[in-house]
Amino acid sequence: MSWPAVEGRHYPGAEAGWWYGDMMNHTGTGSTTISRDAGHRSTSSTPVVSFVNVSKTYGSLKAVDGLSLDLRPGETTALLGPNGAGKSTSLDMLLALRKPTSGRINMFGEDPYHAVKSGRVGAMLQSGGLMPEVTVRELVTLVTGFHPKPEPVDVTLKRAGIDKFADQRVDRLSGGQTQRVRFALAICGKSELIVLDEPTTAMDVETRRLFWSSMKEEVAEGRTLLFATHYLEEADQAADRILVINRGRLLADGSPAEIKARAGARRLSFRLDKVDEQFLLGLPALVNLEVRHDFVQIQTSDSDATLYAVLDAGYRPHEIEVTGLGLEQAFLAITAEDDRANGADHNTADHNTGETI
Amino acid sequence: MGGTLSLAKAEISRLRRNKRYLIFTVALPVMFYLIFGKTNSTGYGVSFKAFYMVGMASFGAFSGAFNNNALRISQERKDGWIRQLRLTPLPAYSYVVAKILASMVTTVPSIAIVFLLGRFYGGVQLPVWKFLVCAIAIWIGTLIFAALAVACGYKLSPDSVQPAVLVVFFFFSIFGGLWFPLSGALQKFGEFTPTYQIVKISTDVIGQGSAALVNVIGIVAWFAIFVALATLAVRSTAETV
């Protein structure tokens, strides 16, 4: 799987459209018009973070493959992708924990290491741990002290919702409490950029809601937020912008509404008396096919083309219905289509029952 | 530097709350000295009570700087605490420096207690400067084992560091002659260990008023080797920490 010249053609920089269209080359629709519908977003500010053609390989595995993106100040961006899509590796490189095999990452105009050491970024990683045998307050006080212009400790404790158990020992907390302490460490430095990797894992529904409401306070103060998640609901509700990545590549970039409305994320369903699965599987723009007796349901990136092909073949389906899909299905469509284009996992793409995430 | 010092302070307060650490660095050497300290014998040309005072102080300092640090570093690497620290403005070297500083500080009382015990329980009569020189030699020796602990902690997983620590600990304790003075073939072999050299420098100071150059060189050489190993271990794990 190589992606020659994709970067050069489709990624002009911050003003690139939300949909880079590189995968469209593989779908057979030939649609290129949606690849450049940009201009809906302010491009005046210099990016807080920029990835320029960043790749990371582990042996023969390409974890991140020519990733280019920009984060603008004050924006809340969700990095959305299935497990193993390259989210954590990308964040690790952004935070100077790993070095890119090739490409360049810039944060606040400097290299990631110096940006981290100047305290301009606060981060919470899945793999980050806490110092045991000290109390929550002692730990937060310690880490707060490392930052040049920190938040007062009591403010951090309150915001993270950990003031109630501030005098408990760190190693005696529940999973959700631990997660909130890690969040406190990410915000205690009053950093301009906050990076969170799957922040609400191990949190119950209520804690998750509290988490996002305190996160909104942070963002309201003008901070830039980047978070990785595989909860689509979260990306939908919290983010201004969603970056969909799969196989280490950026597949889509846009507001939740844009991702949902993205051309092709539609479901076409109809009834057909004599179903020929082989024929249906060969339909243009097909992403996913489900057949139950005479009921056919197709997820398609171009519902018109798919339907016309059915009609052109002489079929006369009835009860035809075309619906736009939610974010989850759009996400599924985007990644499944990518997997299919790469010929990696035909089962997922061909007879998907909605369980791929 | 401020951040490193506050991290070291936090490490010290953790150590003070750690029973296992107190048992190995303070309680065990004290207990052994109370039991065997009055044995009527000699070692390396000095009385056994003087030899054993030096041996037990080294034993406490060694286990304090080595066992605990190696286990902790390995565990904290696995838990992601080292990673978490790397996400703060704290300089990259701070974690290791704070660990070493903390063990340097916490071994002071353990050495002091054993020396006081030697003086007032064992009845070791020495000029004050000899007590001081010996204590300082042992204290500096702590550094060597702190460096070895960093190498083991970074390179080994928590599961494998446990047995490795025991092997290293018993090897250097026995063949370094911390528990009993070496002689004959055992001494020929043990002479090369850093623990032997630390003890020998101290007993030479006690007996003759000066240390042999070869032992001082030996200490410096071991220190260089362990620091090199530690540096390699830290570097080679930079992407997986």
Image: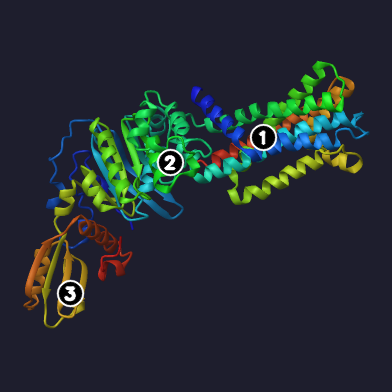
Residue marked by disc 1 = B65
* Callout 3 secondary element: helix
Relative image position of residue B143 (x, y in whole percent): 67, 30
Relative image position of residue B17 (x, y in whole percent): 59, 35
Residue marked by disc 3 = A280
Q: Which mark is residue A132?
A: none
Q: CA distance from mark 3 to mark 2?
A: 46 Å
Q: CA distance from mark 3 to mark 1?
A: 70 Å
Chain for numbered disc 2: A
Q: Are marks 3 and 2 on the same chain?
A: yes
Mark 2 closeness class: few <14, some 14–19, many ≥20 residues within 10 Å: many
Q: Nearer the viewer, residue A235 or A53?
A: A235
Q: Which mark is residue A99?
A: 2
Q: Which quarter of the rendered picture does the N terminus of chain A lie within?
A: bottom left
Relative image position of residue A188 (x, y in whole percent): 37, 31
Horizontal side of B231 relative to B80 (left or right) equals right
Horizontal side of A320 relative to A25 (left or right) equals left
- Residue type at mark 2 is Lys
Chain for numbered disc 1: B
